[in-house]
Amino acid sequence: MPKKVLIITYYWPPSGGSGVQRWLKFVKYLPQYGWDPIVFTPENPDFQLKDESLLKDVAPETTVVKIPIWEPYQLFNRLTGKNKGKANVVIGQQKGGMIHTIGMTIRGNLLIPDPRRFWIHPSVKFLTTYLKDHPVDAMVTTGPPHSMHIIGLKLHRTLGIPWIADFRDPWTNIDFYKDLHLSCLADKAHRRKERMVITEANAVVSVTPTWCAEIEAKHPQKVVLVHNGYDEADIPKEKAKPDATFSIVHIGSINEARNPKILWQALSELLPKHEGLRKNLKIKLVGKTDPSVSEDIHRYHLTEYIQQTGYIPHNEAIIFQQNAQVLLLLINNTPNANGILTGKLYEYMASQRPILAIGPIHSDIANLMKETNAGLIIDFNDLEGMKHAVQQFYERYQQGVLKATVTGYEKYSRKAQCGVFASLLDDITKPSIQ
C-alpha cells in the first residue's frame, strides 16, 4: 500500500512559469515510487503567469486541497490602480523609483518571511484538523515563498510529521536580499526563521551543489541535492527541424540581472564585418523581458534581428526550443551566480541543441555543462570570448554541422530526480530502532 505525503506549495497549475514545474512533475512521478501525494495550495493565488496547458500533468486521481489566501498585493493593486498580478512585478523585479523602494522595504521589514505570510495561520489551523481525518506519512514544503516552510514548521512541531524543507531558491542568501532594505531586527527575524526551518526539518533539499553547501554551513545536518531536471514526456516524439535561419533562442523571462549585454555588444561588432551573419541571424526571445533588454537592443542597433514573443504555454515554448540553432542560457549577474542552476538548462540539454550560456565559468552550471558536453559558457565580461563563440557556432551552421553531442543527461530527468526525492522520503519515515 502506498504511503501518503503532503506537498505544501504556493505554485500549482494553472500558475505558469518556472516555480510550478518542480513539484508539478514530482507529484506526477511520486506514485511510481510508492508515494501517494496530497497537494495543498491556495485557492486564489496572485500569480503573474497562467498556463492552462500544465493541467494535463495533473492526474485525475491526484488529491488537491485548496483554501483561500489573502495577499497584500491585492491591497497594493487597489492603491496603485494596477491590474491583478502586476504588483509582483513592481515589488519583486523592477528597480528604481519610489514605489519600488517603498514596496521592497515593506516586503522585507513587515512581511516576514514574505507577502504570503497571511496564509500561514489559516493553513495551519485547517491542516491540523484535516490531517486528523486524512493522516499522512510525511510532509514536504517547497519555497519560495518561504511562508510554506513556516506552515510545515508549525505542523511538524504540533503533529510530529516527518518533514522535508525543499529550497528551490535560497532564503537569506537570495540575490535580492540586500534590496529589501532590512533593519537589524528584520534581518535577525529572517535569519532566525530560516535557522528554525533548516534545524528542525528532518531533511533539507536544494537544487544546486553551492546552495546545498551554504545550507550545510549554517547547520550541518542532512542536506540533499535534488536537481530540477527535464520531463521526458515533454520532449516531442517527432524529429526536430532546426530553423533555416541562424536562430539564437532564449526561452523564459529576462530580468535586468539576466540582460545579456555582452552578447548585444559582440553582435554589434560582428555584424558590420560579416554579411552572411547579417543575412541569416535571428534572435528569438520567448517570454517576458525587462525594459533594459529592449533599450540595449535599440542601443546596439539590433532591432531588425529580434523576434520578441511574450509568455506562451510551456508546450509551445518546447517547439521553439527544439527548432533553435543555438539555445541562449542566461544566469543572473549577481553575487550568488556561482550557485544558480536554472531549470531551463535541463530542458535545453534534452533538446539536443547547442547551448550558449552567459555566466561564471567556475560555477555549478559551468560544471554541469562540462560534464554533459552541452555547449559553451562565456563569462559576463568576456567580449572576445563571446565574439569567438558566435563565430564558431555560425561557421558550423554554414557547414550544416551545427549539432549537439550532449551525453549523460538522462540521470537529470524529472522521473530520475523524483526517485532521489522518494528515497529521501523513505529514509526519513523508516521506523526508529529502539
Image (cartoon, rainbow, N blue to C red):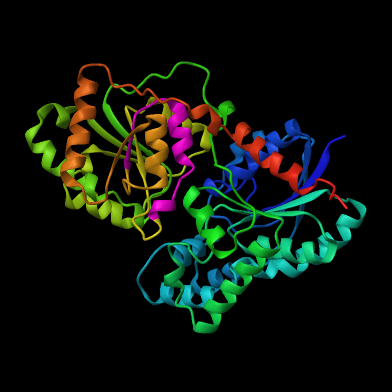
Q: Residue at 38% across / 25% down in the picture?
A: 323
Question: Residue 381: percent from the left, percent from the top?
Answer: 22, 51
Would residue 74 be found to the left or right of residue 422 on screen?
left
Confirm whether the magenta stretch covers residue 353. yes
Answer yes or no: is residue 353 visible.
yes
Furthest residue toward right:
133
* Residue that extends furthest to the left in the rendered view of this protein: 273
Q: Residue at x 38, y 27 (%)?
A: 353
| 160 over 293 or under it: above or below | below
Q: Quadrant of residue 95?
A: bottom left
- Residue 54 vertical position relative to residue 112 in the rendered view, above or below: above
Left or right, 62 with reference to 89 = right
Which quarter of the figure is the N terminus placed in? top right
| Residue 105 is a magenta residue | no
Place residue 243 in its image quadrant.
top left
In x, y percent, where is residue 267? Answer: 18, 41
Q: Does residue 42 sit above or below 108 in this rendering?
A: above
Image coordinates of residue 314 in percent, x first then y, are: 52, 37
Count of marks placed on residues: 0
Instruction: Work out whether residue 111 can be spotted.
Output: no
Q: Residue at x 58, y 68 (%)?
A: 114
Residues in magenta?
337-357
Residue depicted at x 41% and y 33%: 371
Q: Position of residue 429 (x, y in %)?
A: 80, 47
User: 150 left or right of 211?
Assistant: right
In-image side of 261 versus 412 (left or right):
left
Asked whether 282 or 259 is in front, the reply is 259
